[in-house]
Structures are given as structure tokens and as C-alpha cells.
């Protein structure tokens, strides 16, 4: 049986000299893994069936064999409907698009239809051609975590359940999937120091109205606001997946992840990883 759909190519691997293995995020069928046989071949057949070959982040109209029992289906047609040139000419949009692609491929189950998330991703890639880059990316990460059921707890302390809205000093604990208040943090190794202001922005974005893939009334964010949120959410996702994200270095500088604990009041909006206590230094 053949299925037709719209899809964005979110993972691409050359397979032999002539073929490609793709993960496509389809509008109506969710994530599908397909092989495009002959898509690399510079023949009339290859270029006519696959529109000259599939590129990462291209959005296309596609036809594929739809056999549930197969881990790898066959892509039989691909026609680019939106190449979004700006994703290839500007570094920040490209990097964020690849990061979002990795999150989608890791957090969404294969063959779990997510038409709303598809619309949100397509809208976000369009925003990357406007000044609304940082806020659009953060909003998609938040929605993706919510849709996949992995949204961290951002309004109450995961240990004592106290409302953290007025906390001046805030922590995030990837192993518990949420924020920690200053009273509880001392007993919790592996916590990160986080600036409460970006966390408040994330809570505010969660409450904004959505329509047709768009988030309405998104506030303009700078890197100083989005970077600490990315650091916190990346640590959260990496804990969920038990591995590092390949694209995390695209999102922000590596030193953001490994700063030592700073117990002074936070003056710069950065997320810093607190080292777990050294087991050889435990008090007797
Ligand atoms: Zn607490």
C-alpha cells in the first residue's frame, strides 16, 4: 500500500553510492523511516522521482510504502514544496532547526501522528526567516516537551512542592525533571543553578494562545534569555535519553554546561551545572 503525505526531512544518511536513508516527519503519519533508492543517482529516473535528491530540512510532498510491520519503508516519490532557503544561508536558524529536528526524532514515537506538532515545526522554521528566532525556537521546545509528556515541572519545587514564583535563587534538577527551591537544593546533588527570570518566561510562553501552528503574542527573546533556558531544557532531555544530544553544541557554547557552583546571588542569566559531591569527601 502506498501513502501520500507532506513531510519535513529531519534526518538523512547516505546509504551506498546511490541511496539515502531518511527520517521524515510527516503531517499525518508522524515519524517514518524510509529508504530513497537511487535518490543520489544522477539519472533521469533518480532526479525525476526525488526532485534531484532529498535535502535535510526540506519540506516535500511524498509517497512511501506504508507497511506497519516494516521498520524501513520505501520512499517512492519526493517533490520539494518548501526548501526554506534561509535555513541554509544563516547559521543560527540552521543550527536551531537541526537541534529541533534531533529533539523531534528522539522524543516522538515512530508512527505516532502529530499533525499539530508538524504545523508548529513548520511555522517555527518560517519564523527563522524573521527576527523572532529565539522565542520561536524556545516555544517549540516547550510544546514538544509538553506533547511528548516530558515537560519539566516549572512552577513548583519538585522536592517540597512550594510555589517558586517568588524565589530569588532557583535550581533545576534533571534527575527529578523540575525546578528546586533554595531550601531544598542543598540536599540534592546534580542540580543546576538557574536564573528565575528565564524560567518565568518559559511559564508565560506555556500559557500563550496557539492557533494554526503559531504561538500568539510571543515576547521577543535575546540569547541572554534563551541560552539559559536551552541549557536547562537540554540537561533535562539528556537525562531522559541518558545520552548527550549531538546538536547541543550548535545551540550554545559548551562552557555553559559545565560552570562550577556559584553560591553568590546570580547577576547574569546563565544556567550552570553543579557538581555532585565528591564521594571521597563525605563527612564522617
Ligand atoms: Zn523545595
Image (tube, grey):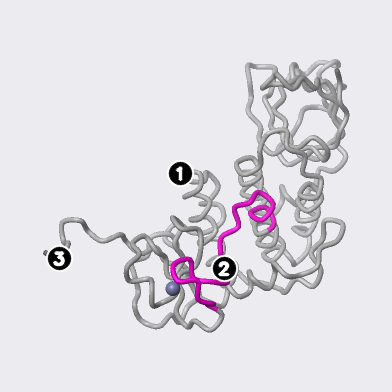
> Which is in the foreground here, disc 2 or disc 1?
2
Residue denoted by label 1: 242
Q: Is residue 34 left or right of residue 123?
A: left
Sequence-earlier tag: 3 or 1: 1
Location of residue 172 in the rendering, given as x and y in whole percent from the top left corner = 46, 65
Sequence-earlier tag: 2 or 1: 2
Count the marks. 3
Sequence-earlier tag: 2 or 3: 2
Q: Give whichever of 56, 109 is nearer the camera.
A: 109
Quarter of the figure with residue 127: bottom right
Element at label 3: loop
Quarter of the image for the N terminus: give it. Answer: top right
Residue denoted by label 2: 154
Q: Looking at the image, do the residues carrying marks 3 and 1 touch, with CB atoms under 8 Å apart?
A: no
Which residue is found at the position 85% from the left and 37% from the top? 6
Q: Is residue 5 above or below residue 210?
A: above
The stretch of residues the image draws in magenta is: 143-164
Is residue 248 part of the magenta span, yes or no?
no
Q: Is residue 260 left or right of residue 211?
A: left
Which residue is found at the position 79% from the left and 37% from the top? 26
Residue denoted by label 3: 283
**Ligand 1, image quadrant it occupies:** bottom left
Q: Looking at the image, do the residues carrying marks 2 and 1 touch, with CB atoms under 8 Å apart?
A: no
Q: Is residue 29 left or right of residue 15?
A: right
Amino acid at each position: 500500500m502506498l501513502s501520500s503525505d507532506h513531510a519535513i526531512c529531519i534526518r538523512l544518511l547516505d546509504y551506498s553510492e546511490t541511496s539515502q536513508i531518511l527520517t521524515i516527519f510527516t503531517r499525518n503519519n508522524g515519524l517514518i523511516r524510509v529508504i530513497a533508492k537511487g535518490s543520489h543517482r544522477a539519472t533521469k529516473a533518480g532526479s525525476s522521482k526525488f526532485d534531484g535528491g532529498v535535502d535535510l530540512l526540506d519540506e516535500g510532498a511524498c509517497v512511501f510504502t506504508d507497511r506497519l510491520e516494516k521498520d524501513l519503508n520505501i520512499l517512492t516519490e519526493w517533490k520539494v514544496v518548501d526548501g526554506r532557503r534561509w535555513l541554509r544561508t544563516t547559521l543560527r536558524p540552521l543550527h536551531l532547526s537541526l537541534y529541533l529536528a534531533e529533539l523531534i526524532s528522539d522524543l516522538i514515537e515512530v508512527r505516532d501522528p502529530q499533525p499539530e506538532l508538524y504545523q508548529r515545526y513548520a511555522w517555527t522554521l518560517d519564523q527563522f526567516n524573521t527576527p523572532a528566532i529565539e522565542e520561536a525556537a524556545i516555544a517549540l521546545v516547550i510544546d514538544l516537551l509538553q506533547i511528548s509528556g516530558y515537560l519539566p515541572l516549572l512552577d513548583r519545587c519538585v522536592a517540597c512542592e512550594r510555589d517558586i514564583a517568588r524565589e530569588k535563587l532557583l535550581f533545576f534538577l534533571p534527575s527529578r525533571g523540575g525546578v528546586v527551591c533554595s531550601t531544598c537544593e542543598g540536599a540534592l546533588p546534580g542540580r543546576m543553578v538557574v536564573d528565575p527570570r528565564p524560567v518565568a518566561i518559559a511559564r508565560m510562553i506555556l500559557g500563550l494562545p496557539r492557533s494554526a501552528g503559531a504561538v500568539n503574542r510571543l515576547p521577543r527573546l535575546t540569547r541572554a534569555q534563551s541560552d539559559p533556558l536551552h541549557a536547562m531544557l537540554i540537561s533535562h532531555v539528556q537525562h531522559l535519553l541518558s545520552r548527550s544530544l549531538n546538536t547541543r553544541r550548535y545551540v550554545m557554547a559548551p562552557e555553559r554546561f559545565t560552570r562550577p557552583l556559584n553560591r553568590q546571588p546570580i547577576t547574569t542569566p546563565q544556567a550552570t551545572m553543579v557538581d555532585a559531591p565528591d564521594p571521597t569527601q563525605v563527612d564522617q
